[in-house]
Amino acid sequence: MAIKSGYVSIIGKPNTGKSTLMNVLLGERLSITTNKPQTTRKKILGILSAEDYQIIFLDTPGILTPRYLLQEKMLDYVYESVKDADIILMLIDISDDPTGKKFLEDEVVNKILSLKSVKKILAINKVDLSNESEVKKLIEQLESTKMFDKLIPISAITGYNIAELKQAILEILPEHPKYYPDDQLSDRNERFFVSEIIREKIFELFHDEIPYSTEIEIEDFKERTKGKDYILANIIVERETQKPIIIGQDGISIKKIGKAARRSIEDFLGREVYLELRVKVKEKWRSDPSLLKKFGYDTSSEG
């Protein structure tokens, strides 16, 4: 029996539904998802294994024009992920870009499209928010570019055409032995996913600049055979004025974050945890190379 195995990088502009799509394809909630753009900051690897195939998905940050060092690192992850990909799965949000103009005129998108040695699938997402004639028109427009091996309209949120998309990936996935054991879901550890869950709750509970100015540092993670696991996490902010906003009057905001995060962490880990949150200020951490490296934003170490 021939085994198919390979890397599929999910690429697109912010808020196109990349993380939702990866979670749906995996049947597991690995990537955090919010209704705000730029939620994903690092490459997140998700492994889908069956008897005769293994698809290794890479969820990537949204393609943007960097305004500070953290965003430069995020864009580096996009380029890194396509470099060794067997398939580039590009995503476009028809509700935001009904003519495909934003997508086709983007400099980073065009750099990726110019890669000749890699297969490309374009998924037109959020067709549930559009109409049939608009979808048909966009498909014709994008097919005329002859830049894609396959083009499929989907809705990650409703599951429309997800089976067809997966089949399209399998058709062009190369024959290769599996890269990972069948029971492995990601190359990231539990600490990473716990920090992502806490960050997700901050994105859900706060507006404006606060979510983008925060980072999560897991200071302690004790697994216990008796009683709840203990997790101590630091919420890092950029300015002293942001600290009281995260804490809230009488600690109400940080309690909300903790309560929501603990529930999701327990669901993810499948066991009870005691979660302690603290807030620390690291001035301008998003533009500080040493702090970014400390928080894991080092492309050389990310592969």
Image: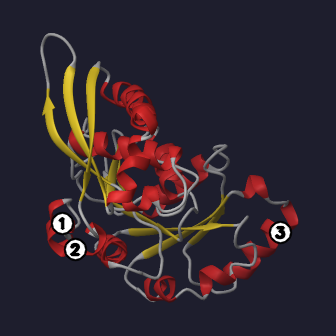
In this figure, which residue is indicated by the disc labeled 2? 288
Q: What residue type is labelled 3?
A: Glu
Chain-order first, disc 2 or disc 3: 3
Image quadrant where residue 50 sits: top left
Q: Nearer the viewer, residue 83 or 272?
A: 272
Which tag is nearer the camera, tag 3 or tag 1? 1
Q: Which mark is residue 134?
A: 3
| Residues at marks 1 and 2 touching, judged by CB atoms closer than 8 Å | yes
Q: Counting other residues with Cα less than 10 Å from the Cα at mark 2, is it few (<14), some (14-19), or many (20 or more)? A: some
Q: Which of 198 and 283 is in front in this view?
A: 283
In this figure, which residue is indicated by the disc labeled 1? 291
Q: Counting other residues with Cα less than 10 Å from the Cα at mark 1, is it few (<14), some (14-19), or many (20 or more)? A: some
Q: How far apart are marks 2 and 3 (CA)?
A: 45 Å
Q: Nearer the viewer, residue 144 or 95?
A: 95
Image quadrant where residue 238 sits: bottom left
**Could you tell me residue 192's position as x and y percent?**
25, 46
Q: Distance between the residues labelled 3 and 1?
A: 46 Å
Residue at 39 percent across and 48 percent down: it is: 244
Q: Which amino acid does label 2 sit on?
A: Asp
Which tag is nearer the camera, tag 2 or tag 3? 2
Q: Which mark is residue 72?
A: none
Secondary structure of residue under mark 1: helix
